[in-house]
Image (cartoon, helix red, strand yellow):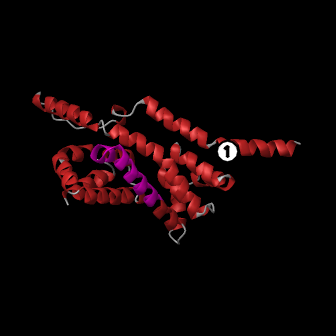
Amino acid sequence: MVLLAAMAFMAFRKGGISFEALIANREAIDAFVTEHRLLALLCYIGLYIAAVALSVPGAVFLTLSGGFLFGVAVGASAAVIGATAGATLIFLLARTALGEPLLRRAGPRAQQLAQGFRDDAFSYLLFLRLVPAFPFFLVNLVPAFAGVRLGPFVAATALGVIPGALVYAFAGTGLDSVITAQKNSFRDCLAVGHTDCRLAFDATDVLTPQLLGALVALGLLALVPVVVRRWRARRDAAS
């Protein structure tokens, strides 16, 4: 179970993803994925669910890793399943007695979000999945208090995370060159005697402005039904 241990270390070390862990365990992870692909995929999905349900920072890098390990189609699909299942767990948890403490933790932003869900739950949730204007945890929590039904929540979540999952998984296929460059820089740093050498990951190394712009455009498209509905309501009220 080297993959599970290594990836769990990646996801939960110091409350977030560790790029260093991926590099340090890369050969072991690659070998495990090659020999036990289905088990590796299930481990990855389970880890993604846990990361989302526990609101661990670094889901973007986890999705990049999925593309890196499994390819675009499989990696993105696994990320969508993991993100949707993890989000649904929080949504269902919010409907229990534990929901109130979670809502208090969310603060005043929760009320701002709740009104949008009451006006047009599906389109609003779809927009927030495509364009993460609020923390993922908050967007999973507030719909439960705003009366959003489980079916629309799951559907909008799955549809909303698909574009981002494809973009990040595709970008993850280029992670190999980033790892090589980081390893070379790290060795050069050590060679000259520096003591503060570290392996660092920057999403801009693999994500282009064009890809991110496409996500924003999709998010704005999701708001079109909301804008049209409000425009018609105002027109009818004025007539």
Locate the N terminus by quadrant: bottom left
Magenta-drawn stretch contains 77: yes
Left or right placement of residue 175 versus residue 146 in this view:
left
Most common secondary structure along the magenta stretch: helix
In the rendered structure, the answer to whether residue 5 lies left or right of residue 162 reads left
In the foreground, 59 or 98: 59
Q: Nearer the viewer, residue 99 or 50?
A: 50
**Where the C terminus falls, by quadrant?**
top right
Q: Is residue 159 above or below residue 39?
A: above
Seen in the picture, residue 201 relative to 122 is either above or below; the reply is above
Q: Residue 21: image x %, image y %?
A: 22, 47
Would you say residue 106 is visible in this rendering? no
State whether residue 182 is above or below residue 159: above
Which stretch appears magenta? 66-87
Q: Is residue 63 visible?
A: yes
Image quarter of residue 42:
bottom left
